[in-house]
Amino acid sequence: MYKLLLCWRYLRTRWIALASVISVTLGVATMIVVNAVMAGFSNEMQTRIHGILSDIVFESHSLSGFQDPTWHMEEIRRAAGDSIAGMTPTVAVPAMLSFQVRGQWVTRQVMFIGIDEASHARASDFGRYLQHPENRRQLSFALREGGYDTVDSQSDAPGPTRPALEGAGWPYRRMRVERERLWRERQEQERAAGPVRSVDQQVDAVLAATEPAEDAAADRQDPFKAARPDEGRTMDPAQEQFTGVVPGIGLASFRDSTGVDRFLFLPGDDVKITFPTAGTPPKAVSDTFTVVDFYESKMSEYDSNFVFVPIAALERMRGMIDPQTGIPSVNSIQIKLEDGVDLEAVRDRLRKVFPADLYAISTWRDKQGPLLSAVDMEMAVLNILLFLIIAVAGFGILAIFFMIVVEKTRDIGILKSLGASSAGVAGIFLGYGLFLGTVGAGAGLALGLTITWNINRIRTAVEWFTGERVFDPSIYYFFKIPTIVHPTTVAWIIAGAVAIAVAASVLPALRAARLHPVEALRHD
Amino acid sequence: MTDATGEEPLVRVRGVKKSYRSGGGRLEVLRGVDFDLEPGGFVAIIGQSGSGKSTLLHLMGLLDAPDAGEVWLAGRRVDDLPGSQRDRLRNTAIGMVFQAYHLLPELTALENVLAPLYVRHSLREWLTAGGAARARARGLLERFGLGGRLHHKPRQLSGGEMQRVAIARALVAGPQLLLADEPTGNLDEESGAGILEALSELNRRDGLSIVLVTHDTAIARRADRIVRLAAGRVEAV
């Protein structure tokens, strides 16, 4: 009874002890906030990695891939049984993407990925990350007649952040084609109004005008021309598109400091992509494609690297279709499993069936193992460092308690003279430590949760107050700081803080317990 | 173990020796003390400073253990008891009053009086025993004229009031023996006289056995018997 009473009285009257309570509070609050933000970032990252990679990736070691994806998918289904929810074949090759910005060619290294329009969205979250609502429902590589999102569909931030996408699609393409036509006409007019041509030039022009057209000559020489009516026909870019591609949004845009996305090219623009053929040795081939949408997973590694194209077109252009049988080859098969199925178990089953020297079979976690391990290690190191804050608070408690034991030596003697046991006296200080730890951790819990739940408001306030960006969306591609509070983590933090407070009070408590009552009573 | 009258002493001290480390050697404070206190007796122990009277009191109060000899309380040898039993005896059978009052500054007068009972009872026991304990403590404080000072902290009380609170605290657990170490040493004459009167009354009216340590012969005369200590030995009874 006296232990409780004295703990309570000491807590109320020894204000110096509150200094250590504040340390514990700040330590606990910091750990809760940092863990919540780290868990939020980690979760966002894992969601996006998983979103693009599907559950299990079945790959060929060779760039030329393996033949007959249909047979492979049947074998996979036979090996994995009912656990498969969906599969889709893909072809991925390194490529160079080139596009024009104000007359200058810009080239980027990319991963050119052929996907099946019908099945790819079922095997991954691919569809979620597109900018046109219709494409999110069902992907199409046909250019849309406008309607692209001008706000980030994955963000609840108010106001348009991508005003450039408002006219994207066919309206933009027609306008661009018209503008280019007008520009060409003006160039020609300027050339026509230029200096008088030389005699040689005038002769050449007459000869060119009177010479029969090459096409007509070719028509006469080529007996198969009638079978290829479109060959040589000039395409009308205002009415037609090339094969559609969906590049990552990071290839096409950059975000300025106000959070508005600026675009280097838009849906409706044409780009050139150079990639290797499937033969040995591979040869570089190049073709023109029309951008039909943007892919935005919020993982800059993907958004600045991936360009998606219809798998059939890529297989054809790379020469991956057997000319005799018409059977295509693919690089990989993305496998989505039913909810709750053990990924590792299915992966191991497939590994037993398919030889490892021909196929690489891995879960999405295996594929991103080093990255996920690095994030986990980062969190562990950060937690250790932050826990040192609470450890420092523990040393504060230790010092303050020693001071209190010295100050209260005579009181300890009095209690012993009244019959208090040594264990009881130690219990006063251990209880006092427990009180301080609990009060500090409780206050830290309240503070930490309040900060976590209002972190974006606090961020806004800090940005308003300092005029500096605390969380730059051009870096993170998130409009708000993601947070997740794991109750288990919070419980461990609280338990750790209380344990440190109690542990810090053990030595002072032992010292108090060992005081001789007569000497304690004589203490001044 | 009984004395010549056939009555068993409440306190019996036999051949008690006690020394303390002092500088490089040992200082012998008690060199074989024999002492008896009959039930209901009032004995004053006198002697000069350093004669060992407070040490003897601490040994009787089980705050310290002798180097040699025996201490008996109510027919039971207590000097060699384990710590927990000594703690229990200190709480239930012995009340102590000190020159410097030794009240707990964080507690009020009433709480200070209740302190031995706080030590005795757990929180659950207190829920049932607390009411009676409070009533008893309040009654004791009123008996000593402190009915209006129940909720005052020690710093708000005079020396005499603090010593009366200390006496009430020593009595609240219903002890068999009251040990008073220079209880008037820090008080003015009038307050000191009041304290001595209170102790005499407790002995006369309630039959409480008291051992009073003092260096003042005039104060010692209040007791039934005087024991003089000199150089660690009983010089005269």
Image (cartoon, coloured by chain):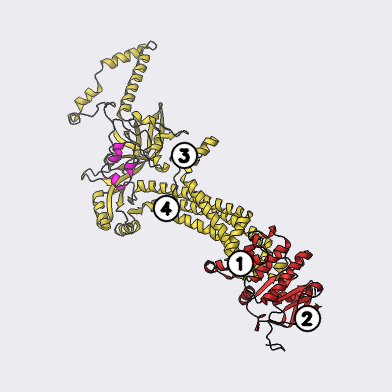
Chain colours: A yellow, B red
Q: Which mark is residue B31?
A: 2
Which of disc 3 and disc 4 is earlier in sequence? 4
Q: CA distance from mark 2 to mark 4?
A: 80 Å
Establish whether labels 2 and 4 are both on one chain: no
Task: For mark 4, name the chain.
Answer: A
Q: CA distance from mark 4 to mark 3?
A: 23 Å
Image quarter where the C terminus of chain A lies is bottom right
Label 2 is placed on what type of residue? Answer: Arg
Provide residue B111's location: percent of width, then percent of height. Answer: 62, 63
Residue A117 colored magenta? yes
Q: Which residue is mark 3?
A: A475
The image shows residue A330, relative to residue A438, as above or below, that is: above
Q: CA distance from mark 4 to mark 1?
A: 50 Å
Range shown magenta: A115-139
Label 3 is placed on what type of residue? Answer: Ile
- Residue plotted at (45% across, 38% down): A473
